[in-house]
Amino acid sequence: MTNAGSGGSCYSNPALDALIKDANTKPLASVVDKYKQAGQMLIDDSVAGNLVYGIQQYVVPPVGQGCRRQCSIRLPWSDVRILQHT
């Protein structure tokens, strides 16, 4: 909804707001179709699908090759190899 506390996207659609506000006042069983309609509105209005990576730590054993600091973020996984070992 517009100005949702955890939205972060600045998305605003008064029609969606009205639909959700109305649906939230009624029993769930009677408004499932309204929530589905609201979901479809979000899909139809979508212009970007952002994928955000946090900083993650990886331990790479000596048999790993091609993985450097934060490889999951900056380097493609296709460059990572497991060397032959016993």
Image (cartoon, rainbow, N blue to C red):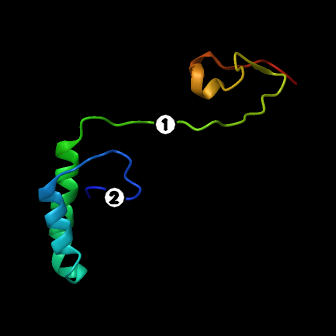
Q: Which residue carries the number 1 mark?
A: 52
Task: Report the side of 79 relative to 14 (left or right).
Answer: right
Return the x and y of residue 64 as percentages of the image width and height.
76, 22
Of all residues, the one furthest to the front in this rendering is 3
Return the x and y of residue 86 as percentages of the image width and height.
88, 24
Return the x and y of residue 70 as percentages of the image width and height.
67, 26
Please tell me how crowded label 1 is: few (under 14), some (14-19), or many (20+) other residues with Cα within 10 Å: few
Of all residues, the one furthest to the left in this rendering is 15
Q: Which residue carries the number 2 mark?
A: 4
Q: Nearer the viewer, mark 2 or mark 1?
A: 2
**In front here: 74 or 63?**
74
Alpha carbon of mark 2 to alpha carbon of mark 1: how far?
A: 20 Å
In terms of image quadrants, where is residue 34?
bottom left
Q: Secondary structure at mark 2?
A: loop
Question: For the N terminus, which image quadrant?
Answer: bottom left
Please tell me how crowded label 2 is: few (under 14), some (14-19), or many (20+) other residues with Cα within 10 Å: few
Q: Secondary structure at mark 1?
A: loop
